[in-house]
């Protein structure tokens, strides 16, 4: 009895080479975009003054949060914040400077900065435990 060994067909090899190449190119492009160019938005919470801005307000519950003091008053347990959306590239560039304008203690939008916005409280966008400041 003779056994015949099937050889992979040339079209099959080409198909796998093309698929592998596309995967490598996709990973490389994503790496460059995210790691090298830092081309993505950072969304974070920053402090907000409820006297002059429409802030999100969240009250910590001492029963469920270990960092929340039960001795403090209800007003002291309320945290006010707004959201900031900022390009990761500008945060990185700011960290490289000595002045640290816009990134010193907490993130901030600088004058004329592109792609940097604040989101203030909107009653239709609230999640559990959140409310708007009055």
Image (spheres, rainbow, N blue to C red):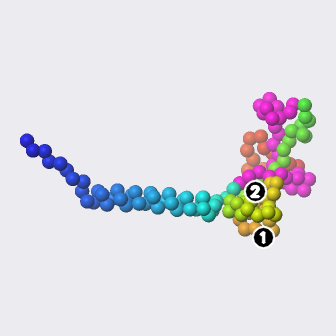
**Mark 1 and mark 2 in contact (Cβ < 8 Å)?**
no
Q: Nearer the viewer, residue 91 or 127?
A: 91
Answer whether residue 42 is visible to the viewer in this image: yes
The secondary structure type at the circle numbered 1 is loop
Question: What residue sits 81% from the left and 50% below the top?
Answer: 81
Quadrant hosting residue 14: bottom left
Q: Residue furthest top?
A: 63
Q: Dot 1 surroundings within 10 Å: few (below 14), some, or many (20 or more)?
A: few
Q: Dot 2 surroundings within 10 Å: few (below 14), some, or many (20 or more)?
A: many
Quadrant hosting residue 77: top right
Q: Which residue is mark 1?
A: 112
The answer to whether 111 is drawn above or below residue 132 in the figure is below
Query: Horizontal and vertical percent for residue 113?
Result: 75, 68
Question: Was residue 54 drawn as part of the magenta stretch in this picture?
Answer: yes
Q: Nearer the viewer, residue 125 or 89?
A: 89
Q: Residue furthest bottom?
A: 112
The answer to whether 127 is drawn above or below residue 89 in the figure is above
Question: What residue sits 73% from the left and 62% below the top?
Answer: 96
The secondary structure type at the circle numbered 2 is strand
Question: What residue sits 43% from the left and 60% below the top?
Answer: 22
Q: Which residues are magenta?
A: 43-70
Question: Was residue 60 drawn as part of the magenta stretch in this picture?
Answer: yes
Residue 55 is marked as none
Query: Horizontal and vertical percent for residue 104?
Result: 81, 57
Question: What residue sits 26% from the left and 59% below the top?
Answer: 10
Q: Residue furthest left?
A: 1
Q: Which residue is mark 2?
A: 84
Compared across the picture, whether 110 is left or right of 36 comes to right
Compared across the picture, whether 47 is left or right of 1 comes to right
């Amino acid at each position: 009895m003779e056994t015949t060994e099937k050889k992979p067909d040339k079209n099959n090899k080409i198909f796998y080479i093309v698929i592998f190449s596309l995967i490598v190119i996709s990973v490389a492009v994503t790496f460059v975009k995210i790691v090298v160019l830092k081309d993505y938005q950072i969304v974070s919470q920053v402090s907000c003054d409820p006297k002059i801005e429409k802030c999100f307000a969240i009250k910590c519950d001492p029963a469920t949060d270990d960092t929340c003091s039960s001795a403090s008053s209800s007003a002291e347990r309320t945290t006010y914040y707004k959201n900031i959306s900022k390009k990761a590239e500008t945060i990185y560039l700011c960290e490289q400077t000595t002045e640290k304008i816009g990134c010193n203690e907490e993130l901030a939008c600088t004058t004329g900065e592109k792609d940097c916005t604040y989101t203030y409280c909107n009653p239709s966008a609230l999640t559990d435990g959140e409310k708007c400041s009055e």
